[in-house]
Amino acid sequence: MSVPLIILILTGILAIVVLPFRSRLRLTASIASAGALMIGGFTLLATLEEPFVLLGVSLKWSGTWHLLGRSMTLDQGNRAAVAFMYLVGSLIFGGVWIARPNRTFIFVGIISIGVVAASFMIQPFLFAAIFLEITAMGAVLILSSRESRFRSGIVRLLVLYTFGMVAILIAGWILESQGVTPATPELATRATILLALGFCVLMAVPPFHIWLPGAAEQSNPYALAFVTILLQSAGVFFLLRFLDSFVWLRENLGLFQGIRVAAIVMICLGSVWALAQRSLRKIMAYALLSDFGVTLLAIGTNTPAGFQLAIDLAGIRAISLTVLGIGLATIENYRPESNEDFKYKGVAYYSPFSVVAAITGLLSVAGFPLSAGFPGRWALIVALLDADLIAGLSVILSLACIGAIALRWLRIFLSADYAGKPIAMPLVERGFMIAGVAFCVLLGIFPQLSYPWVVEAVAGMTQLFP
Amino acid sequence: MARSGIASDLFRCEGHRMTASEVWLQIATIGIAITGSLLVLFDDRRLLVFTLAVQYALVAFLISCVLNVQIAAAKLVAGMVSCVIFLIYLRTVRTNPAEDILRTIPFNRLFRVLAVLLVLLVALGVSTGNLVNLEGLPPEIGTGTALLICLSFLHLGLCEEPLRVGIGLLTFLSGFEITYSILEPSLAVVGLLASVHVGIALVCGYLTLVHDIDQSETRL
């Protein structure tokens, strides 16, 4: 048996098992969370290419599964990334019964995680673009809700990812069959332009971010958090694999300069647009845009430390966004029926745990001191202030703008317009939110807790991390 | 890829006289231009899906001229499955939602006819350059690719109704695959791209269904 095949079969079984219980959200969430945790653990601990004894039976698991002339491979280069997706899935599925996104969330979510895992394992890895397109289809189903009539943001996501897939596939063909090297500048330029187009879509670089505010307005915030974690983590890992595999790409200094410019544009536009918003959901979307920009900026530094920071920021984002998403979703779920003109005033008095989660999550996405997002940003600012002052200042601008927005919303939540009684939130829900907030703060104070994971995740990229 | 060389020999003109295969290829390319244009012009949803099915058949024919028939057949099957998925969804929604199409720019028939004519000219212009034409392949392959991709851009730019967006995306992918199948004829990639077609049909069909239910409720 091969481990990639086992992982995909287990994912399929998990999806089928939860399907009949879709209406029993707590049960489904528990099964999905435990199942994803087990698959993630199996991915991390499975013995590859060496014989071992299990229950008295001698076994040997292969890391490669051949399929129709292509293969899926699990090795040190992608094992941590595959496990990361399942562990994040476990965390997010655990909170589904609190956030209450649509009924397809868990079923499609499990399949989407399996598809992203397959995109990490496929060889040649250029075909991962097709898997990301399939993930985008799953994202559309996860994001679609009957709350909103217009779904232009969700439809745009599908259109943009289709264009991105095509651009990356053509670039992949040029790279594979035409033999691009530093000595073939014309071909290298063509491939670089196509790759840049594809990755602009994957990383939501403006104007390819247009799906994000629309999707945020039309979807459950928790669903949006899950989708962005999934798509962005896959995009970052895919980009790093490209840089690891092609020497001419790594040596193209213009490319890294372009990445830095795109990142600065994302950070500044995201921060300023977030300041101009009155809707909390749109603020989440633009804060995310700014956060994606910071990750891209880390890659644009073109240093091993920068690449590690990018992975670290993508991992930390999963925690911050889960906490933010669950906070926003519960604020809206517990909104009093009498409050027809819902303006969030006084929310902190009847739903204090949701408010604490939402504000902590937003501060963490902003990279505010003592939150999980801060250490990564601080390291990036320190690295950039010498090398690229404008880039460093843009990160500080983002931190200040999104942090100010969080504090402004805290003031709105605390404004005493509400005279009713606090909502009796179940103990487990409160416990989940408190644990999320505590985790955010813990990672902010002890960043070294996440560092070994980052080192493990990038261990297989021997060219980027010699 | 081995067959592309044979294909180039097959389709090479001898003097000004065209071979029977060349004539068929040109007929298929003209057919693609017509179906692609009709997809922009029609309002009736069932007609749109039937036109898409015909377009898939023509694309499969073009691919079969330069690649194994099995690969063309796989693409045809994926396309037909996509059309059947759309038709299943259409059984539960209205077939002519002209009054509430999510428009992005003016959508009247005359505007669309003019836009289609302009885009056809652009596509023909693009296909004469070396952007979509590959050495050793009949020029109709490049022309078919350019026509479908340009018309799909027009389709996607005109409105945001999920069914139309789905058809626009499938048209775009069909155009891309005419050339890409020749560049990358591996079975795994053919299978994955086929699943993308079916997936887009499923997702856009679902969004159409939800969209129409919402509109019915709004009217009530």
Image (cartoon, coloured by chain):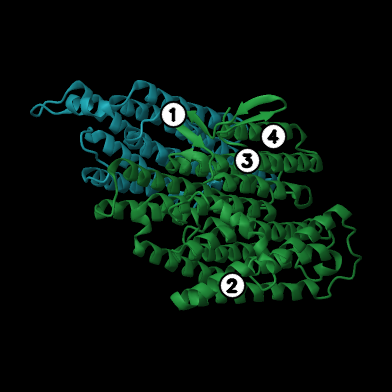
Q: Amino acid at mark 2?
A: Trp
| Chain identity of mark 1 | B
Identify the element where label 2 is drawn.
helix
Q: Is residue B83 above or below residue A129?
A: above
Residue to which mark 1 is pinned:
B53
Separation (CA) of disc 1 from disc 2: 56 Å
Crowding near the residue tagged with mark 3, few <14, some 14–19, many ≥20 C-alpha atoms within 10 Å: many
Q: Amino acid at mark 4?
A: Leu
| Chain identity of mark 2 | A
Any part of residue B150 in sight:
no
Sequence-first tag of 3 and 2: 3
Q: Amino acid at mark 1?
A: Ala
Q: Is residue A162 above or below residue A217?
A: above
Q: Are marks 4 and 1 in contact (CB under 8 Å)?
A: no
Sequence-first tag of 4 and 3: 4
Crowding near the residue tagged with mark 2, few <14, some 14–19, many ≥20 C-alpha atoms within 10 Å: some
Residue to which mark 2 is pinned:
A378
In x, y percent, where is residue A139? 59, 46
Q: Quadrant of the C terminus of chain B?
A: top right
Q: Nearer the viewer, mark 3 or mark 2?
A: 3
Residue to which mark 4 is pinned:
A14
Which numbered tag is attached to residue A43? Answer: 3
> Mark 4 and mark 1, same subunit?
no
Separation (CA) of disc 2 from disc 4: 40 Å
Any part of residue A121 in sight:
yes
Question: Which chain does cyan denote in the image?
Answer: B
Q: Amino acid at mark 3?
A: Thr
Question: Which chain does green denote in the image?
Answer: A
Crowding near the residue tagged with mark 1, few <14, some 14–19, many ≥20 C-alpha atoms within 10 Å: many
